[in-house]
Image (spheres, grey):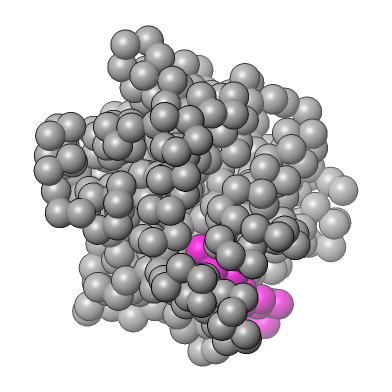
Amino acid sequence: MTNVYVLGTGMIKFGRYPEKNVPQMGAEAALIALKDAGITIKDVEFFACGNLYQASMMVGQRIMQHLGQTGIPVVNVSNACATGSTAFREAYMAVASGMYDIALAVGVEQMGKQGLLGGPGGGDPAYSTEGKLGSGLMPAVFGQAGVEHMRKYGTKIEHFAKISVKAHQHATKNPFSQYRNALTLEDVLNARMICYPNTLYMCCPTGDGAAAAVLVSEAKLRQLAGGRKRPRIAASVLTSDPWTERDLALPDVSTLTRMAAKKAYEQAGVGPEDLSLTELHDCFATAELVHYENLFLCKEGEAAKFIDEGGGVHPDLGGKMPVNVSGGLLSKGHPLGATGVANICEIVWHLTEDERARERQVPNAKVGLAHVIGLGSACTIHILTI
């Protein structure tokens, strides 16, 4: 496997774009990434496109109609919340295998005001979340994960609320974030309860968005980078749920992430203590707290301590192990197909001291981890180094 680097990135501000369609948004992000890389669509040899809600509508090929139809292979990816990051991994594998030198990955989604709905998806209702708990909706699933952590380790609702405060504070420094309003702890705790312990501000907003990345081989990097330092993809891991007895009754939001994290750290030759920053999948505040432990950023049962350590929020910008300095999904938004690529863009910008991360730059960033989980289907982890 050859080394693979991210040469260019592009992203549009997450929000709502009723006047645009999915291919238009995807093409806009792709053009920004191509310009950032210093190439055109004629140089691209492989294209992977991630989109969930229009998965059967050949979104990648429709994006190419805007960029230029060059006849290259186009792969359309649908993999729940990990859709975009799985498309990125497809582009990575295409280059790492040696088959191609330049690949483009785009993640794009137009959700409008649709919710993050879910359900049992068929089969025997006795063996589904709906059959056991009465709800397969994501707020209920991740609310349960939070309550479980509270029961086992004494975590308080204030700890989840602090995560939301952190996210919204970080977002004030991110022009790509859907919401950029700072919140107090009281604002979060007093907001409308959605599914205990997650209040409204502990839930990610829905919306539209697109992000893109250009991936190249080491040989092409030397030709095209023009002396710029570009991050190497040190690990690219994809896992799915293994069978567990728990899954018969309660969704397992942790095992596939822990599997992926162990493989990614081994593949990259680093540990969690080496990370300069992490962009993890905080669809709900409870999810972020649980994933602190799943990614081994802290010890089992110590996520609340991790938040409180040092007299403030430990994983904040300026802390020892900053998490979601983009504002995370809680502020940035969660257009499903775009999320995974957007997380990687954020990591790239910090590692390269890109102007797009200037207001929230993590000093001397050398190693970054991007994580996305599609519940019940996939977890991706990418580790990038400079």
**Magenta stretch: includes residue 190:** no
Task: Name the spot of residue 181 as percent of width and height, x first.
Answer: 15, 42
Could you tell whether 188 is left or right of 64 in the image?
A: left
Residue located 52% across and 40% down the image: 291
Q: Which residue, as the protein is rendered here, is positioned at the far bottom?
A: 57
Above or below 199: residue 262: above
Name the residue nearer the viewer: 150 or 20: 150
Residue 30 in sight: no
Look at the magenta stretch and give its main secondary structure.
loop
Quarter occupied by the C terminus: top right
Name the residue nearer the viewer: 211 or 39: 211
**Magenta stretch: includes residue 72:** yes
In the figure, residue 93 lies in which quadrant?
bottom right
Where does the magenta region start and end?
69-81
Residue located 42% across and 73% down the image: 134
Residue located 60% across and 36% down the image: 295
